[in-house]
Image (cartoon, rainbow, N blue to C red):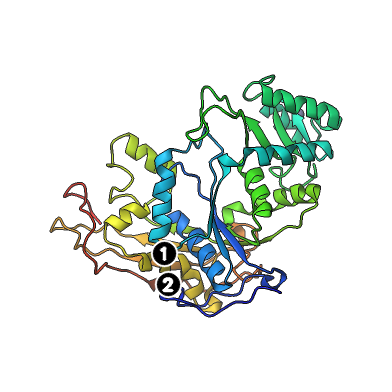
Amino acid sequence: MSARAVSPQSQSESKALPPLPNADKYAVIVTRFAPNPDFVLHLGSIRAIILSHDYARMYRGRFLLRFDDTDPRLKKSALEYYDLIREDVRWLECQWDAEYIASDRIPVYYEHAEKVLRSGDAYICTCTPENFRLNVNAGRACPDRSKSPEQNLVDWAKMLNGGFGEGEAVLRIKTDLSHPNPAVRDWPALRIIDPVKYPHPRVGSKYRVWPLFNFGSAIDDHLLGVSHVIRGKEHLTNAPRTEYLYKALGWSIQEYVHYGRLKTTDIKLSKSLMVKEIEEGLVEGYSDPRLPTLAALRRRGYVPSALRKLGQCERDEPEGDRQDRTQVQLHRKPDHNNSLRGRTDLRCASATTSRKEGPPRQNLQGSSKERHSQPTHLLIGHRSSQKEQGRPADGTVQH
Ligand SMILES: [Zn+2]
């Protein structure tokens, strides 16, 4: 039996989405949202959440929440954010059917790492990053690439038991060294992170080898039965990486749907910038009304339906006006009454694409046909009629 789309069940799914590519190939449609719990969610995540959730509901499938918390060094998660993210996703009315936490699944990633080492589809590279880059950019193999599986398993054990230090060895997946995109060539899958210097908030210093995003999420997408990966175009190069890994493991690749990113005109959707602003005391925390976090928008009185429309706005445009990018204008207008009564426009506006901007677009229907048209504006400005949930931190906040 294959998956069939059903009519929208509730107000939150009141508009039909374009069909998913190859939906009838799958008995059950399974989608996932995989945030890194290193901060709360912000506007940049809402499309991934809403589209993944709504497609799962549309096909009576399953929507998974997977915490991608496998970088305790540069993208270190914090315990508070797991719950805050759950709260954000629930607030968007996107209840998930099952939850997974990547840091609970490290033995699973190790098992598959060993599998690809044994089959000769991966190797332990001990080059410096500079040397590896020089070789790979020239399409040359690094000296470690020709090691036997036996030697690679010995070196893998050294990665696990401390024989190699941080930065001294990395497990790479063999790909095509002449792949047009050098970032795909022999991509890194697992690396060492010093467990004493960088303990993990959930599992402490238990592990010293951690999967990189591409490896952990690709393994889980298959094992958790994800049929459609719905994500931003910034992930376009991850699909060919996954293909090499799946081929090595004998798995078939799932469907990918890449959507345009939300662009803001006067607020940067940058997690690191927001964290910096908080650390420097420029704003008063993740729910400060000046930030584009969901917590801040909630506090400013937005209701989930306004953000849902923003997450879905691409599908609201007429077929001929489908665009590469969507712009969001979050105007911070002066509020002379020092209250939340000032008007806030949340705009979803399409922008004309240019062929020079990048690879052809894969739109929601899986077509790579580019379209050109005049920009159109779809105003979805919204004010909450509900009681205000909070007050700006100070009276000078503009919104
Ligand atoms: Zn090497």
- The image quadrant where one finds ligand 1 is top right
Left or right of 145, for residue 209: left
Residue 58, above or below 261: below
Identify the disc placed on residue 93. Answer: 1
Going by the numbered disc 2, the residue's amino acid type is Ser
Left or right of 227, for residue 85: left
- Write the residue at 69% across / 70% down: 22
- Write the residue at 59% across / 69% down: 364
Left or right of 206, for residue 243: right
In the picture of the structure, the residue carrying the numbered disc 2 is: 12
Going by the numbered disc 1, the residue's amino acid type is Glu
Q: Are marks 1 and 2 in contact (CB under 8 Å)?
A: yes
Residue 266's x, y, as percent?
A: 36, 54
User: Depth check: 14 or 353 in front?
Assistant: 14
Between disc 1 and disc 2, whose residue precedes?
2
The C terminus: image quadrant: bottom left
